[in-house]
């Protein structure tokens, strides 16, 4: 979104138009809507802005639920925004630590600030991009003076009266649509500045889940987060926001329920053992936090290979007191080992009537989409196929989700 589009959008006419458009999902819908609005005499800037917002609102519901229908976005801002259910948990940590006023430095479209203000915290939301700051101001307007938005660089903000900071440094080139990743030295604000501030002021620092672990301060808590099977972020907590004795944590959220695994440091891996009746795939947050060993020991399981993040056991996973499956793994009952050769493998699967196949792979050079095409599947049954490595052997395992 360019400034001219924003100016056209932030008018009573523009905002009513976005609300009236509702959901626009497909390319055909976009083309038809643009043609209709232009024929009605609306300006190109207003049409582009309103239709763009309608599309973004449709996509934003996955992160913001019903709130998305009253928010404004840029494409890049939506992609980089924290999911509301995750932001709410971050906000709860600030509140529980006694924080009353937080500075959100690099607020983007205001997703995290929305969560902070939503539980009663005072927020100073800051973004270096003028358009993005304006959208954040619109999204946070219902909170009035409780949520102040400033167009400024993080390094320029006076933090007097602020109890803690939330930092989401821009890790991509500037822009509202297509952006590319940049090195830590070119982040905005730069990583060195972020760590210096986090050493002086209690902070939560949002980073990508693949962030270089060697750069995490030793006295900070590093928390990796998975949501519905995707590892979405790493948050480094400092000062009173870091929990005593915890340096590694994995927060796993599925279907609105959350479970967390914590430790004083990286866990030793479990020993390698022979393939058992069950295969367990640890959640991405558990793998990133290097807490696979903790999960393995809780399941009485072992590694299938020292370098492969799959666990195996003779019994199903029972990771809680009520006997339900562990929230930290996805578990599968192994049926049998099948041939590695695609032609022989396809024949075996068709003989078993398997037409729907989930393909998982680790430690091998396999493209699941290409393999599925070669298998020429047909039949009413469904299953999961694991293609992985045990020692120097490639193995193909047919399994069923537990």
Image (tube, rainbow, N blue to C red):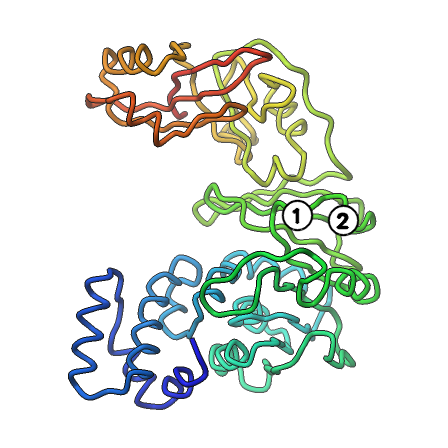
Q: Quadrant of residue 181?
A: bottom right
Image spot of residue 360 (x, y percent): 43, 28
State the residue position of label 1: 211
Q: Residue at x 50, y 57 (%)?
A: 85
Please say whether residue 95 is visible from this viewpoint.
no
Q: Quadrant of residue 4?
A: bottom left
* Nearer to me, 374 or 13: 374
Q: Residues within 10 Å of mark 1 (few under 14, many from 20)?
A: few
In the picture provided, is 189 more to the left or to the right than 128?
A: right
Q: Residue at x 59, y 71 (%)?
A: 107
State the residue position of label 2: 215
In the picture provided, is 345 more to the left or to the right than 322?
A: left
Q: Residue at x 55, y 18 (%)?
A: 312
Image spot of residue 37 (x, y percent): 20, 80
**Quadrant showing the C terminus:** top left
Image spot of residue 256 (x, y percent): 46, 50
Q: Quadrant of residue 89?
A: bottom right
**Quadrant showing the N terminus:** bottom left
* Nearer to me, 167 or 1: 1
Secondary structure under tag 1 reads: loop
| Cβ atoms at labels 2 and 1 below 8 Å apart | yes
Please say whether residue 124 is visible from this viewpoint.
yes
Q: Residues within 10 Å of mark 2 (few under 14, many from 20)?
A: few
């Amino acid at each position: 979104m360019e400034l001219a589009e924003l100016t056209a959008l932030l008018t009573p006419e523009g905002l009513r138009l976005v609300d009236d458009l509702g959901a626009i999902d497909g390319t055909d819908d976009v083309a038809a809507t643009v043609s209709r609005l232009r024929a009605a005499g609306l300006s190109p800037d207003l049409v582009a802005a309103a239709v763009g917002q309608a599309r973004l609102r449709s996509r934003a519901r996955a992160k913001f639920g019903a709130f998305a229908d009253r928010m404004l976005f840029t494409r890049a801002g939506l992609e980089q925004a924290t999911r509301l259910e995750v932001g709410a948990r971050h906000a709860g940590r600030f509140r529980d630590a006694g924080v009353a006023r937080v500075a959100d430095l690099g607020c983007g479209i205001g997703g995290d600030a929305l969560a902070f203000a939503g539980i009663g915290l005072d927020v100073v939301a800051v973004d270096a991009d003028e358009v993005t700051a304006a959208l954040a101001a619109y999204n946070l307007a219902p909170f009035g003076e409780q949520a102040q938005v400033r167009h400024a660089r993080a390094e320029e903000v006076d933090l007097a009266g602020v109890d803690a900071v939330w930092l989401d440094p821009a890790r991509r080139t500037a822009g509202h649509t297509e952006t590319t990743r940049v090195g830590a030295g070119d982040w905005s604000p730069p990583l060195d500045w972020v760590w210096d501030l986090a050493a002086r002021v209690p902070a939560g620092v949002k980073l990508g889940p693949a962030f270089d672990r060697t750069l995490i301060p030793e006295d900070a808590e590093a928390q990796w987060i998975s949501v519905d099977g995707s590892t979405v972020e790493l948050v480094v907590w400092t000062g009173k926001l870091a929990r005593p004795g915890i340096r590694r944590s994995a927060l796993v959220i599925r279907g609105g329920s959350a479970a967390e695994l914590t430790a004083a440091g990286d866990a030793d891996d479990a020993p390698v053992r022979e393939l058992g009746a069950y295969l367990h795939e640890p959640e991405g947050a558990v793998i990133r936090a290097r807490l696979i060993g903790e999960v393995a020991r809780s399941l009485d399981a072992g590694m299938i290979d020292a370098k492969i993040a799959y666990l195996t056991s003779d019994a199903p996973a029972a990771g809680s007191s009520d006997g339900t499956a562990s929230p930290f793994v996805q578990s599968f009952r192994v049926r049998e080992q099948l041939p590695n050769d695609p032609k022989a493998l396809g024949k075996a699967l068709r003989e078993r009537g398997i037409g729907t196949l989930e393909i998982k792979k680790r430690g091998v050079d396999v493209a699941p989409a290409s393999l599925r095409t070669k298998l020429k599947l047909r039949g009413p049954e469904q299953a999961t196929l694991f293609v992985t490595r045990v020692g120097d052997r490639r193995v193909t395992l047919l399994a069923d989700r537990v």
